Amino acid sequence: MRAVTRPSQIVLCIFIVANAFLLSGCRAYPNSPEGVVRKMYDATQERDQDKYIDCLAPESRMMPGFFFWEQVMRAGAGLFGVDASDLTEVTWKDMQFQAVDNDGTVALVRITGKLRLLSLGMEVPYETVETTKKVDGIWYVYLAQ
């Protein structure tokens, strides 16, 4: 016996899956240099350490990253009786990610935007370059060793 699927059922199924994805707040990140860097910056703002580590090249995962240095800063401020949780609250605004050099295995991504230091009530221009590399077909952020 062969199952018969009507086109309307297929369309309805696609509609339901697409809406569930959109409503869940999931963000699809393309497998590209820009996509992995965007994902890493979103992870820092969302304070999602697992998502952050997933962005790093395997050999970079043994190095201190963003969240480690944040803890060091908090511990140092604590020695002076200062609650550093406010000092480490940062958000990004108007972020742009552009691959400026890409040979297919290593790429540089230029990031521009605004860094908001919430505890200081400041918004400052932000510009940097991240190195990414492709490992087994997947792009990762590479932290220099």
Image (cartoon, grey):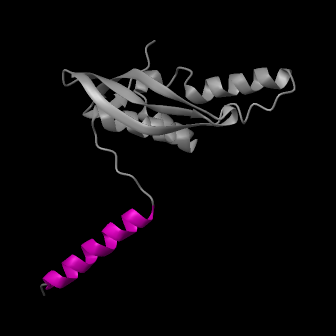
Q: Position of residue 112 (x, y in %)?
A: 39, 29
Q: Is residue 95 above or below residue 71?
A: below
Quadrant for residue 66, please give it: top right
Residue 34 visible to the viewer:
yes
Q: Position of residue 21 (x, y in %)?
A: 37, 63
Q: Nearer the viewer, residue 114 or 21?
A: 114
Q: In the image, 103: left or right of 131?
A: left
Quadrant including the N terminus:
bottom left
Q: How many numbered dots are placed on residues in this image?
A: 0
Magenta-colored stretch includes residue 17: yes
Q: Which residues are magenta?
A: 3-24
| Residue depicted at x 42% and y 56% | 26
Quadrant for residue 117, please give it: top right
Residue 5 visible to the viewer:
no
Task: Look at the magenta stretch and give its main secondary structure.
Answer: helix
Q: Residue furthest top?
A: 145
Quadrant for residue 8, please give it: bottom left
| Residue depicted at x 75% and y 30% | 84
| Residue depicted at x 25% and y 72% | 14
Magenta-colored stretch includes residue 97: no
Q: Nearer the viewer, residue 110 or 24?
A: 110
Q: Position of residue 22 (x, y in %)?
A: 38, 63
| Residue depicted at x 65% and y 27% | 70
Q: Is residue 37 above or below residue 6?
A: above
